[in-house]
Amino acid sequence: MEGLLTCHQCSKHMESLKDHTFWDFHRTWVRRYLWFILVIVIVLTLWIIPYTQAPPELGRNCPKDQAKGLHNISQLEEEKVALGKQLTKKEKEMQKLRKFMNQSQEKTLQLLEKKQEEADALIKESTGFNQTLLLTRQFLEKEKEKTQSLQSQLKTLEEQLKSANSKANSKAEEYKGKIAELQRQIKEQEQRNQDSERGMHYSIMELHNQIRSQEKKCSIGNILGDGTIVAWAFGILLLFICCVKCCRQE
């Protein structure tokens, strides 16, 4: 915020600069920012010094360093030989693995071919099975339609049978009532016939008794001479014949 200047301050500085020369301006700027310049120069020198030093030469190493280097080189060579042996072993193992992989690939390819053939056969079987399923579904749908029609017919027949049974039951009840009435009438008529037969038998017995008594009392000539007795007997006989005919008709 201190470095910022207002317009009024800028105008004052410009007027003051008109009175001073270039040297005066340069001198005042250097006085203000001299410490900043010195810090930058010191930092740059400290940063450049390590890069200006030359690297040490290879032939000027210490004997101790040379011995260590030779020992390290020998160790590295031994490690290199061991690594070479390991690489040969690994290459042999890789060859074996490649052979095994090739054999396994061949076996897998054969198995895949067999599985593909089996899959093709299964696909064919599935297509045939699907066709049979479609046919069975169509047949089942037709059978369902037939069963539905038969069920509807059965329902109508059951309704008709129920109505017929109800009518038959009503008619049977009517016929039962009529039969009971006829049986009652027949029983009454039989009772009447029995009563009439008993009456007729009783009257015949009385007539026989009267005839026997008359025969005892009268002779044959008197009976023939008397026409009233014959008329009475003939009339009673006619009445008996009429009663028998009436009973047979009923």
Image (cartoon, rainbow, N blue to C red):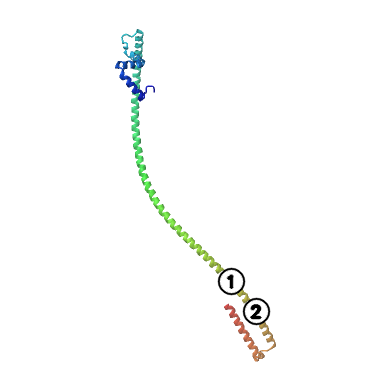
In the rendered structure, the answer to whether residue 72 lies left or right of residue 171 reads left
Residue at image location 34% in from the left, 39% down from the top: 116
Instruction: Specify the quadrant that holds the C terminus.
Output: bottom right
Q: Quadrant of residue 33?
A: top left
Front residue (pair 241, 39): 39
Which residue position holds label 2?
199
In the rendered structure, the answer to whether residue 247 lies left or right of residue 73 reads right
Residue at image location 62% in from the left, 86% down from the top: 235
Q: Amino acid at mark 2?
A: Gly
Q: Earlier in the sequence, mark 2 or mark 1?
A: 1
- Residue 32: image location, x then y, percent: 36, 16
Which residue position holds label 1?
181
* 167 up-or-down from 208: above or below: above
Q: Quadrant of residue 246?
A: bottom right
Q: Amino acid at mark 1?
A: Glu
**Residue 192, visible in the rendered structure:** yes
* 40 up-or-down from 127: above or below: above
Q: Residues within 10 Å of mark 2 (few under 14, many from 20)?
A: few
Front residue (pair 182, 209): 182
Residue at image location 55% in from the left, 69% down from the top: 174
